[in-house]
Image (cartoon, rainbow, N blue to C red):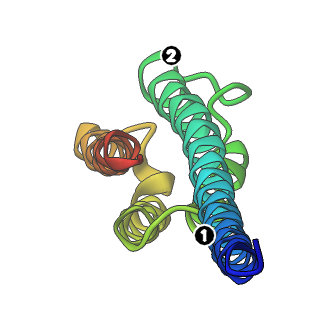
Amino acid sequence: MDNQLPKKIHLYQLTVVFSVLFALIGFSYNVWRMEASEENNTIRTACFEILKNLSSLEQLVYTAHYDRDVIEGNPRKGWVAVGLVADLSALTDDTVEKESAALKEVWSTHWSTMTTSRDSVDKIVEAIDSVRAEIKHLLSSLE
């Protein structure tokens, strides 16, 4: 009986060490997964908001050009939408942020002629579509 007590204590110690290591590894993985999920959730939310603002901007451009509606096609509303897209793109990734900056540049160049120039409308819509494409690519790559 005296021989078995040290063996039992040794087995108990090994079980405790293994249990603590297993719990630590499990906890570490859980924390990592929660952080990754939260980051993906933030990116998704920002992307959906950007998509909504891109749609509003595209509608504004079409309204200004085709309907010649100065109220609904007001460029000041466009500046707000473009600015919001640029701001929200900081929460996504570098490619979306780069395309959003390019959209802002195209908008700043062509907003004043969008009511009369089909070329300006086409360039603005092309920049909007580029941001959309990058967002779709980013969303499909999230885990």
Asked if marks 1 and 2 touch (Cβ < 8 Å), the reply is no
What amino acid is labelled 2 in the image?
Asp
Q: Give coordinates of residue 101: x percent, y percent.
A: 45, 71
Residue positioned 66% across, 62% down in the render: 35
Q: Give coordinates of residue 65: x percent, y percent.
A: 44, 29
Residue 67 is labelled as: 2
Residue positioned 40% across, 73% down in the render: 94
Left-right relation of 26 to 101: right
Left-right relation of 132 to 91: left
* Of residues 31 and 77, the one drawn nearer to the viewer in this rendering: 31
Residue positioned 31% across, 51% down in the render: 134
Question: Which residue position holds label 1?
Answer: 25
* Of residues 100 and 60, the one drawn nearer to the viewer in this rendering: 100
Crowding at dot 1, Cα within 10 Å, few <14 / some 14-19 / many 20+, comes out as few
Q: What kind of element bears circle 2? A: helix
Q: What kind of element bears circle 1? A: helix
* Of residues 84 and 108, the one drawn nearer to the viewer in this rendering: 84
